[in-house]
Image: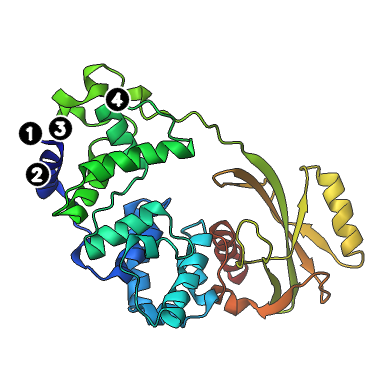
Amino acid sequence: MDFTVQLLSWYKQHQRDLPWRKTVNPYHIWLSEVILQQTRVEQGLPYYEAFVYTFPELKNLALADEDAVLKLWQGLGYYSRARNLHHSAKTIFFDLNNHFPSQYREIIKLKGVGPYTAAAIASFAFKEPVGVVDGNVFRFLSRFFGIFDDTSIAKTRSVFQDLVNELISKQHPDLFNQALMDFGAIICVPVNPKCEKCPFQEQCYAFQNREISKLPVKNKKISVKNRYFHFLIIKNQEKVALQQRQSKDIWEKLYQFPLLETKNNQEEKTWQQLQNLYPNDNIKKITSNSIKHKLSHQQLHLDFYEIESNELKTDAFFVDKSSLDKYAFPIVLWNFIKEYFELKKN
């Protein structure tokens, strides 16, 4: 049986029941695709539902305050996705007269929209026959066709893109792309793929040659950088100091406690720096062991210090403790805040 026909036949029986597949609204489809970048469906679904409820139309998102968008995104990580989503919503609403671009070549011009997301929107909302290429597709097709090109190299994407564009159903490009992704997510998974349930066993290069674990090829190694964050909970009666991260770094535009970052974790030097900053104030370390928080390319080591002071040495500002839940924090900070201030209330 033809590959495309067989894949669509499998999808008809096994497709996942997802809300963004029940609409051709490009805004909702775009929203789902941005949320699902670097995010599992199970984790992303409640965020999708919250965004659609809070910002039912693109206009609502475009006119929203950035802090509100980031607060709703809190916990999903990769916050540049939310900032780019908001930026492009404003571009569509203000610059394109609230008309969502309907062709791949125009969709990909939106900030934060790459080839995969543009292809998904173009095919799902407008039935343009352009194939999606993501991790699921790399994995499934590299195993099926025996493609050993290194997927960590940019030019390899064009190899897969050309292949998918050749295979895609011109009549049902939306269903074909969804089928590709679902097959990689349900059957051809990274570890212990469900080959016993795979209808492509007889044609699959990796299965027939016992090379499933070798594909896809990805030789690039991720270099992880250690960073040491010392957060200062500066309190003045019922107020606590916050600052907003502005630099082009992790957590841009999110809120945090005033921060002292050091190159290593030498506690004695850290104490000396803190005492130089706040010579007349009582400083108490809260964390006995650093809280570790792993990002894709960084390992964070977080410590927290409590300081009673009415002085702010940075661009920080005081807010009422009771209003902390109105600010968007990195999830590791938000989890600490909930526990720390609930303990204090008790």
Q: Earlier in the sequence, mark 4 or mark 2?
A: 2
Position of residue 128 measured from the top left corner of the image (x, y, whole percent): 24, 59
Residue sitting at x 45%, y 38%: 155
Q: Amino acid at mark 1?
A: Met
Mark 4 to mark 1 CA distance (whole Å): 19 Å
Q: Which residue is mark 4?
A: 146
Q: Amino acid at mark 4?
A: Gly
Horizontally, residue 81 falls left or right of residue 209, namely right
| Marks 2 and 1 in Cβ contact (< 8 Å) | yes
User: In front: 343, or 98?
Assistant: 98
What mark, if any, has residue 1 been given in the picture?
1
Q: Earlier in the sequence, mark 3 or mark 4?
A: 4
User: In front: 146, or 63?
Assistant: 146
Q: Amino acid at mark 3?
A: Lys
Residue count near mark 2 (Cα–Cα under 10 Å), binned few <14, some 14–19, many ≥20: some
Residue sitting at x 70%, y 74%: 240
Position of residue 135 measured from the top left corner of the image (x, y, whole percent): 37, 41
Mark 2 to mark 1 CA distance (whole Å): 10 Å
Mark 3 to mark 2 CA distance (whole Å): 14 Å
What mark, if any, has residue 197 been given in the picture?
3
Nearer the viewer's eye, disc 3 or disc 4? 4
Position of residue 271 measured from the top left corner of the image (x, y, whole percent): 85, 52
Q: Which residue is mark 2?
A: 9
Residue sitting at x 33%, y 78%: 56
Nearer the viewer's eye, disc 3 or disc 2? 2
Q: Earlier in the sequence, mark 3 or mark 1?
A: 1
Position of residue 163 measured from the top left corner of the image (x, y, whole percent): 28, 39
